[in-house]
Amino acid sequence: MRRSFYLFIFLFPFIGISKGLYPKPKSPCTLTADCPPPVTLIEGMKYDTSVTGAPKITSNNGGAVSITWLEVYQKGDCKNHADQVTRLFTVRNASGEEVRCNQNITIKHLTVNDVYFPSDTTVDYPDSLTTLTNTLLTIPKSFGSLKLTYTDTRVSQNCNIPVRIRRQWLLEDICSGATKNATTFMNVHKFYNEFKQIIKKTDAVCADDGFITLTPVGEFTPYKYKWNSGDSLPSIFNKAAGSYSLTVTDGFGCTVSQVYDLVSMSQRADIGGRISTDDGIRVIPDSLVFENESLISKLCISQASGLHYGFTLKTRKTGQYNYYLVRNTGPLDGITTKDIVLIQRHILGITKFTDTLQYIAADVNNNFNITASDISEIRRLILGVKANFTYVKPWYFLRKDWRAVAKPNKPISDIEFKGVNVPNFPLTNVDIFVLKMADIDLSYNGLQNNQLESRAKSDEVKLDLHAGIIINNEKWIPVYLKSTKDLYGIQFKLRDISNQSLKLLNNQLDESFIFAKDNAVTVSWSTGTALQWNQDQPLFYIQSSNAEQLKEDTEIAAEWYDSDLNVYGLKISTEDQSATSGSTFFFPNPTNDRIHFNFNFAKLEVKLYNPEGKLILSRTLHSNQELNLQNLSTGIYILNCTRENGSNLSELLEIK
């Protein structure tokens, strides 16, 4: 049988003794002591020094004495039927003298004949962790050589107090095999105590991280659980703050109802508050960082009612608590081309900023000026040229009183939130202000893409994707922008749903307004004034096998802005018509030197552009004339033809 050894350390103070056993001579002091004799006890009995004794000081002139000891516990087996405890005493006086001695304690195991079973009794169910069995039998919490089992039967007709129960005992000696059977009838008062549970639960609930774990103390098993949440296990998890009622049923079918409360962090927090924008929109940071995390017991960050963030302290102490918030995700949240238009109008002097927040949010290059470089930085984010800001953080968490302390040409770090001084408790109202960089119109509302469904609908502006033309076995889809009114900005993103990598030929847009990457093309176009373009020509061409495969990507909201900067959803349609209607008036395509024209009107204005939109040549042609292209490099070009009546046509031309 395996033997177990345990070490225990105790301190037992004595006053006024001197030298003794195993002395360390330090003349003229003297310390001697006699160790207590060996002791034999029965398991279940106390064996502390009040029972077994302590060293007796026989001489000492070295001042006050203290006694400490170690215990070595050796569990008994079927050979010795007893546990052995060796108590190692150390006696010291104030002069530093020290003596040691040992005491042996034998704890004999009970036999089946040492346990008395009452036949009929009346008992209160204990209101503690003490079991009913120990109350009835006055036995140790665990046996050395015995095994005790029992079966309970409810004799009374109902669960009204007192409940009469028959308990049938079986006591077995695991070493000798001897057994003892007995029956006890008991009238149990305070029966409700048998439903007692050991409870562990969340001390402060965040969003839905609340839990309640119950372990039954009672002996009338098995226990069944029915929560008002629908759960049927003794433990429930992932619960919001609130009251949870429970019905517990024991092995007799008796029931009791109990209620357990999970308290929200908003009620428990020592320090906390709201994290929100100037418009009261809550923002969830990626993390809350503490200068000294060892002071914190629990932290919550959630969108639940009450506090938005909060934490409890291990020890409530007044003073400075330094912590800060971080959010580096969602750099595009709240940002659209409209924000760029606002900056452009500010720079042009059309509409100046009126809010300090706009000045701070627009300075994304962190140079205390609002310039075209800030516009470029924001535009590249929208287009997907870059993933995050270069010079600033996408989100700043500011002191609530930032307006009172903000000064021109001062770094934003001067008004960042860095912690709070706590003069007294309770304190649960430390609000934090959030600024989203580049959100000039302060439109962030906590929803992706600025809540697209809230945008106004309009058929006055639309994006047309035509069927396209074939050049060198590749299909090019022309993209037209049609509008019946002035536009002051537009943005959209098209993605090939077949995941085909896209190529781009620009026609009318500056390259800073359009970007193609992998299977997507993004446009963010604004100048601060009304946009100028030729509606009869494509804005650009996309190489794609089918216009139907090009769909709006809601990562960038498809929208346009009128002169008042009202936001409208941009309609994107695929028209099954050729962008090259009437294209037979010139040939061949592709060509390696020249193209011929065949038309029955007086003259035709012809302009040829490279893919970047740069004008390569301009000619006025008459019927049946040809255009010499021998000096041009191979590649794809955009041919724009204007008739006498002003109508024009753009088409891709390949030179081999």
Image: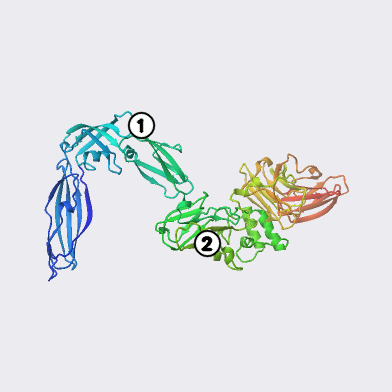
Label 1, label 2: how far apart the Cα atoms are: 58 Å
Horizontally, residue 361 falls left or right of residue 254, namely: right
> Is 431 rendered above or below residue 192?
below
Of residue 192 and residue 558, the one placed in the foreground of this image is 192
The 10 Å Cα crowd at callout 2, few under 14, some 14 to 19, many 20 or more, is many
The percent position of residue 507, horizontal first and vertical second, equals 73, 52
What residue sits right under mark 1 in the picture?
Answer: 253
Q: Between residues 491 and 32, which one lies in front from this camera angle?
A: 32
635 left or right, relative to 308: right
What amino acid does circle 1 point to?
Gly
Is label 2 in a helix, a strand or a loop?
loop
Q: Nearer the viewer, residue 209 or 632?
A: 209
Question: Which disc is residue 187 wearing?
Answer: none
As drawn, the label of residue 417 is 2
Q: Earlier in the sequence, mark 1 or mark 2?
A: 1
The percent position of residue 121, horizontal first and vertical second, equals 23, 35
Question: Is residue 395 at all visible to an observer of this figure?
Answer: no
In the picture as drawn, the residue positioned furthest to the front comes out as 161
Vertical side of 217 occupied by 164: above or below? above
Looking at the image, residue 343 lies above or below residue 27: above
Q: How many marks?
A: 2
Residue shown at 72% from the left, 63% from the top: 349
